[in-house]
Amino acid sequence: MIDVILTIIAASAQPGPDGAAPEAAALSAPAPAASALAAEPQEAAGRFTTAAEVKPILAATRASWIHVREFGGQDLLYVTHLWSWRCGLAQVRLGVNGAAPELWPLPECHLDEGLPNMIKAEDGMPYRSYPPGSIQQVAVEVTYDDLSRETLTFGRNGQPLQ
């Protein structure tokens, strides 16, 4: 059901003058000029593979970007939600407890399939493990495929601090 709701939200978002959703445009900044990334065309096809289609969804679901779970004597930091909308992203960087954000590779999009954003077994696991109780704060830098960026900091409970 949530997928239907998110699809309706994304489909109804009206792009701003630069092609970005109005609420996302205020939060996005251009990526650094030194970046080796290149902006991708923003032709919405209803498959959620562009920043124009993904930004409204990620803006509405910020509290789901990351999740910290204690399991098996470890802290597990999940980025499943970001992986689920990765086809509109160029990269994701995360910094734990004030450490410099590091690149977390995203699996390739499955553009030749009906659900290009699906996570397959061969994509790997969307989490990393840390010592138990060690994660207190996570900084997330999302670079969309139009090269706009959004940075948020989350507490251990996964809620945005900003």
Image: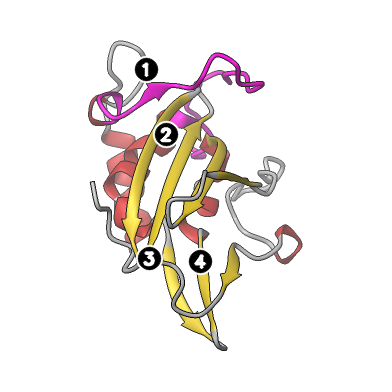
Residue toward you, 84 or 35:
35
Q: Position of residue 115 (x, y in %)?
A: 59, 50
- Mark 3–mark 1 Cα distance, whole angstroms, equals 36 Å
Amino acid marked by disc 2: Glu
Q: Which mark is residue 154?
A: none
Report the residue marked by disc 1: 19
Which numbered circle lies on residue 53?
2
Q: Is residue 16 left or right of residue 145?
A: left
To which quarter of the image does residue 28 belong?
Answer: top left
**Which of pointers 3 and 4 indicates the residue nearer the eye?**
3
Residue 7 vertical position relative to residue 69 in the rendered view, above or below: above
Closer to the eye: label 3 or 1 = 3
Label 1: which secondary element? loop
Q: Which residues are magenta?
A: 24-51
Mark 1 against mark 4, which lies toward the viewer? 4
State the predominant SS element of the stretch in magenta. Answer: loop
For residue 129, above or below residue 123: below
Q: Residue at x 50, y 30 (%)?
A: 45
Q: Residues within 10 Å of mark 2 (few under 14, many from 20)?
A: many
User: Going from the N terminus, do you reach mark 3 or mark 1 first?
Assistant: 1
From the image, tell me which residue sits under label 4.
77
Q: Earlier in the sequence, mark 1 or mark 2?
A: 1
C-alpha gap between disc 1 and disc 2? 10 Å
| Residue kind at label 4, given as amino acid type | Leu
Q: Which residue is mark 3?
A: 136
Q: Quick check: marks 3 and 1 in contact, CB under 8 Å?
A: no
Please tell me how many numbered marks the rendered image carries: 4
Is 4 within the magenta? no
Distance from disc 4 to disc 2, alpha carbons, whole Å, reads 26 Å
Q: Nearer the viewer, mark 4 or mark 2?
A: 4
